[in-house]
Amino acid sequence: MRIDRDTLVFFDASCLIAAAGSPTGGSGFLLSLCARRLLRGAISHIVLLEAEHNIQAKLSPLVLSHFHELLQVVPLVVAPVPPRSSEKGWTQHVNAKDVHIVCATLSIECDYLLTLDQNLVEEISHTAFAMDAISPRDFIRTILPSHEEIAKVRT
């Protein structure tokens, strides 16, 4: 499957935290592609709150500053908060703590869910959801090379 500027990728909190802590890592690189409008990034309010809370509780003020800078420079689609009724029954497919991520990702029809949570990747791989869950590293290695403009940004 070829991807392009219209490909919508959802960043979970783990990816946002990783990008804030290591802007040159995989999550940071993918967010930089969103900033350059080579991909479309998406998040949810809950993911933003979770990322900010974890950064404040566990990381330095510098990382929090990088997080806020990312939010200012990267255009992100914000998924609406899904109604509680849409979450019912999904815990049979994914861990209850991750249902909000799946609901948000599906509500805006994202092509990919980017996560560092390997359990979530595994859980989603066993469903018929209309999206793929993948780590930033695997996305960069296996999906990104099919981007029609990626040769322009690779060095």
Image: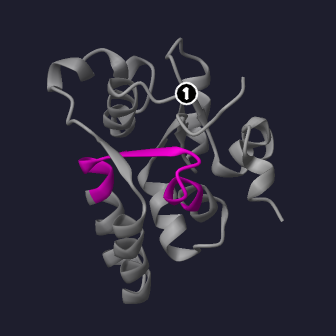
Amino acid at the residue labelled 1: Glu
What SS does tag 1 mark? helix
Judge whether 95 appears above or below 19 on screen: above
Q: Inspect the magenta stretch and tell me whether residue 30 lies in it.
A: no
* Along the viewing direction, whichever of 93 and 72 lies nearer the viewer: 72
> How many callouts does the rendering have?
1
Image point 50% across, 17% down: which residue? 130
* Along the viewing direction, whichever of 150 and 21 lies nearer the viewer: 150
Residue 15 % position (x, y): 51, 56
The residue lying furthest to the top in this view is 128
On the rendered structure, is 90 left or right of 145? left
On the rendered structure, is 122 left or right of 10? right
Q: In the rendered view of the protein, which quadrant contains the C terminus?
A: bottom right
Image point 79% across, 46% down: which residue? 141
Q: Give the magenta-colored segment's residue range.
A: 32-48
In the rendered image, which quarter is residue 56 located in? bottom left
Image point 31% across, 67% down: which residue? 52
- In the picture of the structure, the residue carrying the numbered disc 1 is 123
Residue 69 % position (x, y): 38, 75
Residue 146 % position (x, y): 77, 35
Judge whether 124 appears above or below 101 on screen: above
On the rendered structure, is 96 left or right of 46? right
Residue 29 % position (x, y): 63, 62
